[in-house]
Amino acid sequence: MAGAARHRRGRWRYHAAARLMAMLALFIAIPAAAEPHPLPDGSAVLSLDAATRFYRGSRESTLADVMARPEAFSATAQRGDLHFGYTRQPIWLRTEVVNESDEPKRWFVQFEYPFLERITLHIVTAQRHETLVGGSTLPRHERPLPYRLPAFPLSLAPGEVVTLFAQVESAGSMMLSWNLMTPEAFTDHDTRSGFWLATYFGMLLALGLYNLLLFSGLRERVFLHYALFVFSFTLAILSFNGLGPLMFWGHLGELGTRLVPLGFTLASAMATRFAQSFLQTATHQPRWHRLLGAFRLWCWLAVFGVLIISTRWAMHLMDVTGFTAALLLLLCALHASLSRVPGARLFVLAWSIFLVGAGVFALRNQGILPSNFLTLHGIQIGSALEMLLLSFALAARFNKLKRLREKAQVRMLNTLKRQESLLEQKVAERTAELETLANHDMLTGLLNRNGLAKQARDAFSRSRRNGRPLALLMLDLDDFKPINDRYGHDVGDRVLQQVARRIAQQARDTDHCARYGGDEFIVLAETVDSSQGLREIEARLADTIRQPIQLENGHRVCIGVSIGSCLSRPGDRQLGDLLRHADQAMYARKAAKSEKPTKP
C-alpha cells in the first residue's frame, strides 16, 4: 500500500511538471514570433500567406510542442509554399496579427480551399488561449461558423496582439491559403460564391434530369448513360466543394471524405460507358470498344478499391483513374472524328475542354500547379462547358426524333422551373441567414453595430417626420471582469446572454436593443417624449439587470450597470451624435459613483 501511494505521488509530480513545462513553453515561445501583421484600416480582406510560417509536424505534436520550437517553422517566400499536395503529416501554420486601432475589431479567418478534413485553430494571447475546430468532416452544427469554406471568428481588443496557430490534417491535397476578412466581406464572398455554385449545380441537375427525361421518352440508353455520368460527377463536386458535407451528409464525418474519390471514379466509369454509346464504338471502332471496355472494368475495380483502401491512397487512385479516363476518351474521339463518326467532332471539342480541367485538377492535387482561381475551379469550369457541348451533340445526333424530343423538352422546362424555384428559395433562405449574421451579435442575438446603425437611420427618418425625439441609453456593466476572471469566459458569455435577455424583455415594440461591444449595450427608443419617461426606462433596466444571476455551478452572481442616456436634440442627425451624448452622460454617472463616499 505504501509503495502504491508513493507511485501515485510520483505520477502526480510527473504530470504537474509536464503541465508546468507546457505552460512555460506556451508563453515563452510567443515573443519569439515574427513581427505582428497589423490589421488594415481600409481593406476588407487581408491575405495571411506572406506573413505565415509553416511546420511539418507529427500526429503526436501538441501546441506546446510546436510553440517550444519556433525555429522549426519555415518562412513563406511565395504563395506556392503553402501548397503541400498530398502529405501524411499535419501542417502547422503560424502568424501574428495586431489590432493597432483604438476600437475592438471582429474578423473571420477563412481558408480558401474547402476540402480540408480537420483544422484546429489556436488563438493565443498573453491573457487567453482559445481553441476552435473546423473542417469538412465536422457536421454543420459543430463548426465554429456554418459555412462551406473552413472559417473561424476572431475578435481583437484595441492594441491586442494575437498569435494564430492552425493545425491542418487532411487525406486530400493540402492547399492552405488563408485570409482575414471583415464580417461584411465574408458575407458578400459567401453570397456570391453560393450564387455561382447554385447556378453550376442547378445546371448539372437540370442536364441530368433533362437527359433522364429523354431516356424515358426515347428509350435510347445513351441518354441514361449521360445522366448517370452527370449525377455521379455532381456527387463528387458536391463533396469536393464542401456543399455536400455542409448541407446533406455532414453527419458521416470522415466517411463523407470518401465520397470525393468515390464520385470521381464512378464518374470515370460512367463517362467511359457514355463514350462507347455516343461514339458507337462497337460498330465503328471495335478495337477502341474493347480497350474502353477493359478500362471500364478497371474503373469499377477502382470504385470498389476506394471503399476499402485508406482515404489517402483512394485520392491517388482517383487522380490516376480520372486523368487516364479523360485522356483515353479524347484519343478515342479523335480517331472517331477521323473516321467521320456522327457527333465525334463536337465530342472532341467538349472532351478537350474537360481534359484541360481534369488535368489542372490532378496536377494541382499533386502539388505541381499553384493554387489560384483557375486551378481551384478549373474542373468546374471545364465540366460545365463540356457537359453543355455534349448536350448539344446529343440533340444534334437525334435530330430525326424532333417531335418526341420537343415533348420531352416541355417536361424538361417544367422540371427546370421547379428546380429554379427550389434553388431560388434556398438562395433566399441563405441570404436571410447571412443578413441575420451581418446585423446581429452572434453571442447574444441582439443587434450588432451594423444592425443598430441601420435601425438608427430609419428611426431618425421617422423622428423627422413625426417631430418626436429619439432616446438612446448606453449601458455599461459594472464588475463584469471579476466574473470572467473567477469563473472563466464561458460563464462570462452566459452572463452576457442573460443580461441581453433581460434587456430585450424590458424593451418595447419601438425599442432597438444592441450589444455595442464587450459588456456595453445600447437601447434606442423612439417613443420617449420626456426626461421623466427616460428615467423610468433607466430604472426598469437597472433593476432587472441587478437581479441575481444563477450559474450552472450553483453560484449566484450580481452585476451592476452604469447607464448614460440622452434625448435627441434639434442638431442631432445621426447615431454618432446620440452615442456621444449618452457616453458623456454615462461617464458622468460613473464619476459620480466613484466620488460617492463609502459607508464606515
Image (cartoon, grey):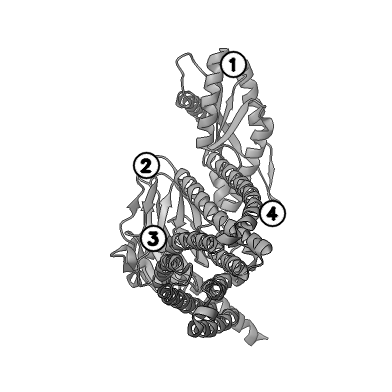
Spatial CA distance of label 1 from label 2 is 36 Å
Spatial CA distance of label 4 from label 2 is 38 Å
Depth-wise, is mark 4 or mark 2 nearer the camera?
2
Depth-wise, is mark 4 or mark 1 nearer the camera?
1
Relative image position of residue 177 (x, y in whole percent): 40, 61
Spatial CA distance of label 4 from label 1 is 41 Å
Relative image position of residue 267 (x, y in whole percent): 55, 71
* Tag 1 near tag 2, CB within 8 Å: no
Q: How many numbered marks are there?
A: 4
Q: Residues within 10 Å of mark 2 (few under 14, many from 20)?
A: some
| Label 3 or label 1, whichever comes before in sequence order | 3
Q: Which labelled disc corresponds to residue 553?
A: 4
Q: Is residue 562 above or below residue 286?
A: above
Comparing 503 with 94, the one in front is 94
Which amino acid type is shown beneath numbered disc 2? Ser
Which amino acid type is shown beneath numbered disc 3? Leu
| Label 4 or label 3, whichever comes before in sequence order | 3
Report the side of 70 relative to 544 (left or right): left
| Label 4 or label 2, whichever comes before in sequence order | 2
Comparing 537 with 76, the one in front is 76
Which residue in the protein does label 3 denote? 374
Q: Is residue 583 above or below residue 86?
A: above
Quadrant for residue 537, please give it: top right
Label 2, secondary structure: give it.
Answer: loop
Q: Residues within 10 Å of mark 4 (few under 14, many from 20)?
A: few
Which amino acid type is shown beneath numbered disc 4? Asn
Depth-wise, is mark 1 or mark 2 nearer the camera?
2
Which residue in the protein does label 1 denote? 531
Spatial CA distance of label 3 from label 1 is 62 Å
Comparing 279 with 534, the one in front is 279
Q: Which residue is located at x 41 percent, y 68 percent?
A: 352
Q: Which labelled disc corresponds to residue 101?
A: 2
